[in-house]
Amino acid sequence: MEVDYSGDIMTLNMGPQHPSTHGVLRLELKTDGEIVADAVPHIGYLHRCFEKHVENVDYAGVVPFTDRMDYCAAMNMELGYVLTVEKLMGIEVNNRVRCLRIIMAELSRIASHLIAAGTYGNDIGSFTPFLWCFRDRETILDFFEETSGARLLYNYNWIGGLMHDIKPGLEEKIIEFIDYFEPEVDNLNRLLSDNFIFIKRTAGVGILSPEQAVSYGVTGPNLRGSGVKFDVRREEPYLGYEDYEFDIPVGLGEHGPVGSCWDRYMVRIREVKESCKIVRQAVARLTPGDVREAVPKRIKPPAGEVYMRTECPRGELGYLLVSDGSLKPYRLKVKSPCFTVMSAFREVSRGAMIADVVSILGSFDIVLGEIDR
Amino acid sequence: MLTYFRNIGQGIMTIVSSMAIAGRHLFTPSVTLQYPKEKWLLPERSRMRLMNKIEDCIGCGQCARSCPTECILVKTEKRGKEEAPVFASDGTAKKLRTYVFDIDMALCCYCGLCTFACPTQCLIMTGEYEYSVYDKDEHIYHFAAEKPLTVAGESRQNPPEG
Ligand code: SF4
Ligand code: SF4
């Protein structure tokens, strides 16, 4: 006798106020017992009309709004935008600005990956790494605050330069921090990454195969976690990244198949170390100079269209800017890395356990501010 | 069955080793600040509440034009020819009488763009951060000190509406 069990599908809403969704995201889970038959993400709870709104703001005024897209890595968001406008206007910045931008961007990447690792540990059920990560992130935020005056939303990268030069002596403090921080990463590895329980919860879960990742247009650590070696800093260097020595870590699949949650998590931890290397090199290359040398009096780009992509901590961030030659952008389209990875979420989580959905979502390291804009 | 017990054993071992790493922190001093009593020393570039030294403001409205959230309202009128000239402390003639200079700190996004636009550096961001109020309207700070002489209809408003 055959029994048809397929009617027992229950709809379960996860979110929008769920602690593991890192923002306001609603997941509509169709559950078959413990197994997730389908997971539909509903986004838009944090929509602030960014793209439409910036059409009414002048070019310099857009920078504070880009900060608010990915508030965990605001430096990288600004950087992408100012590089786009500079590309359209043909502004060349001097070496000091380039090095400082790289230092800030990489420090911001470290801070952002620390949040990712910390909150991921928290999602899985260990609270200590979260506090450790935030402790080290705090030091980085102190550097940013000392330089730009704000802790989270900096408005530090300007079109054609930077808001302020760094305070004298900050280079040494940054190097001191990197010296202290690199061994701390190994501590974090011993505490969390190599933890047997953590590996059991993440390895072999939420496998995103390289083919799937590429076909969904997933970028950044999520793509590299699937073993695809692609980094915009290498493929299409900007700010002189081609002169820096750093590796691009990829998921190796030490525990189970490549592309699991653990691989994606581990890529971030390894990237933090690479960022440390870049910061060291950038500090060594700092030359004196005026950081506001190339800031134009009036920002009025010629009419035209430009696309620029940068590697932000969560993946490839692209800006498409259309200018009609006026003082305000005609159109600004953002290609957000978290949005593309969210589209792959449905496929990855199909067939997973309910508890693993939290694990999968955390490993993607999404920021809702950037998905919804 | 064997795997089951091995998993339990490894689970316990991993907790013990993690506790050993975390346990070192039992002996580090506490870093908690007892906030209202103790305060953090802010760096000098801190961007908190805006302050306008209205004596130095020439009413040019550059700040209002550069503000992305349009939270500054400047209303000025021309000073009459017969009036005694007034100067800002850096010697710039104040040709306009600023009779409204309101900043809505509830709208402000603390980007600091207005302070860089100001030609006389009279608009600054201070390190003051304890200014919560019960009513949102109390976040509108009025800086203007002078009263308009002409009727409001003849005055110029920055930024122009629309
Ligand atoms: S800090 Fe920014 S948002 Fe606030 S008043 Fe100045 S320009 Fe406007
Ligand atoms: S830019 Fe400065 S001088 Fe001009 S209106 Fe604003 S505060 Fe006054």
Image: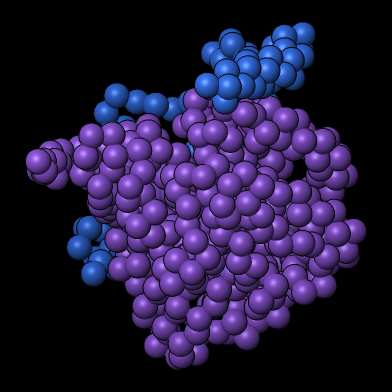
Chain colours: A purple, B blue
| Quadrant of res A288 | bottom right
Horizontal side, residue A361 vs residue A295: left or right: left
| Depicted A302 relative to depicted B78: above or below | below
Percent coordinates x, y for residue A97 in the rendering: 74, 66
The quarter of the rendered structure image containing the N terminus of chain A is top left
Rendered view: A345 above or below A358: below
Q: Nearer the viewer, residue A299 or A225?
A: A225
Q: Position of residue A183 (x, y in %)?
A: 82, 36
In the image, what residue occupies the spot 45% across and 79% down? A321
Q: Residue furthest front?
A: A1
What quarter of the picture does the C terminus of chain A occupy?
Answer: bottom left
Please say whether residue B66 is visible from this viewpoint.
Answer: no
| Residue located 74% across and 37% down the image | A185
Say which of A158 and B159 sits in front.
Answer: A158
B105 shown above or below A69:
above
For residue A118, side relative to residue A21 (left or right) = right
Q: In this orientation, which residue lies closer to the viewer: B59 or A186? A: A186
The number of numbered discs placed on residues in the rendered structure image is 0
Residue found 43% across the figure and 72% down from its top: A215
Question: From this viewpoint, is residue B151 visible?
Answer: yes
Q: Percent from the top left, x then y, of residue B5?
A: 57, 18
Residue A225 placement, left or right of A11: right
Q: Nearer the viewer, residue A133 or B14?
A: B14
Residue located 83% across and 65% down the image: A245
